Amino acid sequence: MLRIATLVVALAVSSVALAAPDPKAVLQRERVTAAQKVYTAGVSRLAAGATSAEVVCSWSVRWLDAELAAGTPAKQAFPDHLSRMEKLETAMTKARDAGTVTSTEADVATYFRIEAALWATNGSKQ
């Protein structure tokens, strides 16, 4: 009877431990979500001329860093960041050609796209 009671208590304790989310993991996922929201808002603000490519690119890097810290595999996180930077570079190039942004804004996007391509190739920020 004592063995059964011990087993029941052990199972109850382990199920409580499994049910409680890791506070660090929760914060890491929240940081991913926050960076994603700021990046997305930045893209909209950039299209409206209310921010710079530098700001948007920097938030994509923060999003990347947050994903890596939260456990997103590098094989996924780096290509996702590269994709964001490729889209941004295309948009900035079109905007430059249309005369709505300076060539410097397009060059900033190109720099970050090249950096993202290097990181994706290396699988790290080296």
Image (cartoon, grey):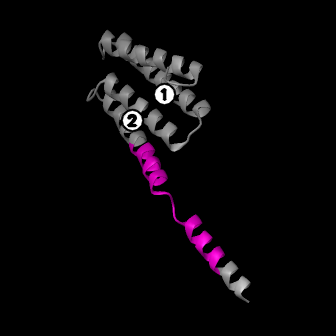
Identify the residue at horizontal 27%, vertical 26% (top origin).
Answer: 49
Which mark sits nearer the N-terminus, 1 or 2?
A: 2
Identify the residue at horizontal 69%, vertical 78% (top origin).
Answer: 7
* Front residue (pair 54, 99): 54
* Front residue (pair 36, 51): 36
Q: Which quadrant would residue 23 be assigned to in this image?
A: bottom left
Q: Amino acid at mark 1?
A: Arg
* Front residue (pair 107, 15): 15
Residue 125's x, y, as percent? 49, 23
Q: Residues within 10 Å of mark 2 (few under 14, many from 20)?
A: many
Task: Please tell me the numbered disc located at residue 44.
Answer: none
Is residue 63 found inside the magenta-colored segment of the image? Answer: no
Write the start and end of the magenta stretch as one range: 9-34
Q: Residues within 10 Å of mark 1 (few under 14, many from 20)?
A: some
Q: Quickly name the residue at label 2.
A: 39
Q: Quadrant where the N terminus lies?
A: bottom right
Residue 73's x, y, as percent? 59, 36
Q: Quickly name the residue at label 1.
A: 84
The image shows a total of numbered marks equal to: 2
